[in-house]
Amino acid sequence: MTALVLALLAGALVGLALGSLGAGGSILTVPALIYLLGFSPAEATTAGLVIVIVTSFTALMGHARAGAVHWRAGLLFAAAGLPPAAAAGLLSAHLPAAVLTSAFALLSALAGLRMLRRRTPQENGTVSAPRAAGAGAALGAVTGFLGVGGGFLAVPALVSVLAVPMSVAVGTSLLVIIANALVALAARAATEVSLDWALIMPFIATAVLGAWDGKRLATKIRPAVLQRAFGGLLLAVAAVMATGALR
């Protein structure tokens, strides 16, 4: 199977996850770039930010048209994560590949376990400013360091910390993802990382299409079923990356 075909298939899967769950898709991007398309960890995390930004924006528009985005809460949450995203983005470009791979494997495992849990975060009706700042900062650091959107963290945090209804948390998380990813990408602009746009552009194209399909899929399949499917996939990704890091 050629690299172009792999890029098209991987992009479709990433878009499907982001569109349906507002999470999970971006954490699949970096492993796909490394193990399917031959990118280095530094190249993959940078390219991953580009892919996440474009795909998340497409998915966000779909949720916004449906009135499923809490703009004020999303912007407040994102603001706390911007400085950590920038700092982590600068740090990531100077770390050994094995460190990035190991950290990503751990994050994939944690994300997979979280998505396999059936319980849904409870809306508590209160907003804690310190907790919101802490959760936003942590999410920003994860985005900058590993080139992922962190939607699997943003959705439960928006519900439990900022009291965003679950019905709009997915769309709102996409807004947070875009803001953090833009800052993290800007922080890497001065680093010497070359990107293979001949593979990135087809990846983005099918990711965008997949995001639209994911939005429609979310209305037809129970969220718990989607979460378990992607949770299992993330655990498999974590196992592959951990094995590679130990070699």
Image (cartoon, helix red, strand yellow):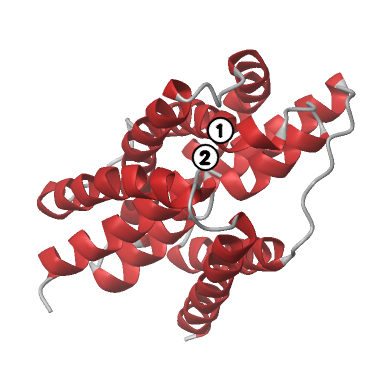
User: What residue is drawn where x is 51% and y is 84%?
Assistant: 243
| Nearer to us in this view, 123 or 201 | 123
- Residue 80: x and y, percent? 68, 23
Looking at the picture, does residue 115 appear above or below residue 148? below
User: What residue is drawn where x is 85% and y is 30%?
Assistant: 131
**Residue placed under numbered mark 2 in the picture:** 144
In the rendered structure, are the residues bearing label 1 and label 2 in contact, judged by CB atoms less than 8 Å apart?
yes
Q: Earlier in the sequence, mark 1 or mark 2?
A: 1
The answer to whether residue 147 is seen in the rendering is no
Callout 1 environment at 10 Å: few (<14), some (14 to 19), or many (20+)?
Answer: many
| Nearer to us in this view, 217 or 234 | 217
Helix, strand or loop at label 1? It is helix
Q: Residue furthest front?
A: 220
Give the left or right position of residue 130, taking residue 186 as reference.
right
Callout 2 environment at 10 Å: few (<14), some (14 to 19), or many (20+)?
Answer: many
Looking at the picture, does residue 239 appear above or below residue 68? below
Location of the N terminus by quadrant is bottom left
Three-letter code, disc 1: Ala
Which of the numbered marks, if any, corresponds to residue 85? 1
Give the left or right position of residue 243, taking residue 51 as reference.
right
The answer to whether residue 12 is seen in the rendering is yes
